[in-house]
Amino acid sequence: MILFVNACVREQSRTKQIAEYLLSILDDDIMEVKLKDTKFPMSDETFLNQREEAAASGDFHADMFAFARDFASADTVVIAAPYWDLSFPAVLKQYLEQVTVNGITFRYSEEGIPQGLCRARKLYYITTAGGPSVPVEYGYGYVRELAQSYYGIPETVLIKAEGLDIVGADVDEILEETKKKIKNQS
Ligand SMILES: Cc1cc2nc3c(=O)[nH]c(=O)nc-3n(C[C@H](O)[C@H](O)[C@H](O)COP(=O)(O)O)c2cc1C
């Protein structure tokens, strides 16, 4: 099962367009989490306490752990997130807070080092940016670190299309070039 984490906001999202192309090439069932339509619980003290109690008892059947359970059992993860303010939309951070659960997607070793519990071996991160050559360390870089250090997903792949909002940019051409790269790499 491919878990498609859709953090795209706009109806005509270019990021979503590229993600859908990738998903059409990857040959598996798709479970989509549409973040813009999702109401996330606040990570408040009650939530943190419930999470700790569950971790202590090992009972993760509550609905609040559904995001983490689905993430942990996916064979492949595809995240689509537009480039916003050097990073990604805040709703993706809310989602990752729900997914990063000690006892489901990772656990701590006796030395306090996170050990991954996720089944996926590969995570794709798709983004598009308005400007050219944008830095990716606070968006893709952050997700890559989480995937590798916490979730235990060893391979992460960045797919990006940049310069889409520059006056005169040939948006269709940029998107086609990005799709060609995806096709050649797969
Ligand atoms: C709230 C917001 C913040 C943005 N911040 C940046 C930015 O920091 N750098 C940049 O190059 N483009 C920025 N953009 C432009 C988007 O990255 C660009 O339009 C992207 O292709 C949008 O993706 P979408 O078509 O999937 O919605 C921003 C757009 C929005 C709406």
Image (tube, helix red, strand yellow):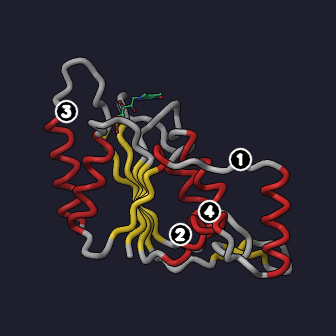
Q: Nearer the viewer, mark 3 or mark 1?
A: 1
Tag in front: 3 or 2: 2
Q: Amino acid at mark 4?
A: Val
Which kind of residue does numbered mark 2 sit on?
Phe
SS for tag 1?
Answer: loop
Q: Amino acid at mark 1?
A: Met
Q: Nearer the viewer, residue 118 or 110?
A: 118
The quadrant holding residue 68 is bottom right
Q: Is residue 14 left or right of residue 153?
A: left
User: Marks 1/2: CA distance?
Assistant: 19 Å
Which residue is outermost to the front?
Answer: 63
Determine which of the numbered discs, if any, sits on residue 171 in the image: 3
Residue linked to disc 1 = 42
Disc 2 from disc 4: Cα separation: 7 Å
- How many residues crowd mark 3 within 10 Å: few (<14), some (14–19), many (20+)? some
Alpha carbons under labels 4 and 3: distance apart: 34 Å
Residue 8 position in % (x across, y down): 40, 43
Judging from the image, what secondary structure is the residue with disc 3 in?
helix
**Mark sitting earlier along the chain (2/4):** 2
- Location of residue 129 in the rendering, given as x and y in whole percent from the top left corner: 37, 35
- Real-space Cα separation, disc 4 to disc 1, in angstroms: 13 Å
Residue at 20 percent of width and 52 percent of height: 179
Q: Nearer the viewer, residue 54 or 142?
A: 54
Q: Decide: marks 2, 4 in contact (CB < 8 A)?
A: yes
